[in-house]
Image (cartoon, grey):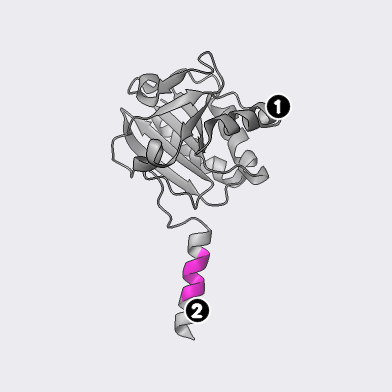
Amino acid sequence: MRTLTAFWLLAGTVAAGDSLPSGPNVGDRLPDFKARAFSGPDAGKEFKLLDRTKKGPTLVIFVHEITRPGLQFLRPVDDFVAGKDKLATQVIWLSEDVEKTEAYLDRAKKSLNLQAPIGIARTGKEGLEAYGLNDMVKITVLIADENRVVANFALVDPNGKDSRMVIEAVKKVVK
């Protein structure tokens, strides 16, 4: 019985996202990768993440899967970072089929209503496989400064409450 209870306690922790790693660890260098810009001045063009960060404060939000609660997480963070010129912000949709994801984002553009630039990165062997992102989470958030990760949030079931902790972490790097 104790083993079964311990299993359910552990399962609850994993389901809450407390112990699922995703992406580089705090202190690691922020790896570079290529993505296709969906929005912003470079829409349709390929870019490298580190070309946009300029080694300064950086917020990268990887969207593995979007849900209504996930949007409740994204919008407050997006509103907070809007207009912060010293912060390089990038929302990256992860996909095995970039064209299909572009079509989805085009249809969802008005309901998403994000100000941050959106990019699409290919997952799997041709894309971000080496980045260490966990497909069991819906959103992975990395905050970096001088291309070193200073905060990492692997959100299994993101919602509006999670946006507060991300905003507080961003405040620490944007001085």
Q: Is residue 118 magenta?
A: no
Q: Position of residue 155 (x, y in %)?
A: 51, 48
At label 2, the amino acid type is: Thr
At 48% from the left and 49% from the top, the residue drawn is 135
Mostly what secondary structure, the magenta segment? helix
Graded by Cα atoms within 10 Å as few (under 14), some (14 to 19) or many (20 or more), the crowding at tag 1 reads few
Name the element at disc 1.
Answer: helix
Residue pointed to by mark 2: 5
At label 1, the amino acid type is: Lys
Q: How many marks?
A: 2
Graded by Cα atoms within 10 Å as few (under 14), some (14 to 19) or many (20 or more), the crowding at tag 2 reads few
Task: Give the camera-side residue of 94 and 28.
Answer: 94
60, above or below 165, in the image: above
Q: Do the numbered discs 2 and 1 sit on residues whose CB atoms are within 8 Å?
A: no
Q: Position of residue 128 (x, y in %)?
A: 40, 38
103, above or below 69, in the image: above
Q: Quadrant of the C terminus?
A: top left
Residue 51: give its label.
none
21, above or below 108, in the image: below
- Residue 105 falls left or right of residue 28: right
51, above or below 96, in the image: above
Name the element at disc 2.
Answer: helix
Q: Residue furthest top?
A: 41
Residue pointed to by mark 1: 110
Q: Earlier in the sequence, mark 2 or mark 1?
A: 2
Point out the frontmost of discs 2 and 1.
1
Q: Residue furthest left?
A: 28
Q: Position of residue 99 (x, y in %)?
A: 56, 29
Magenta highlight range: 7-12
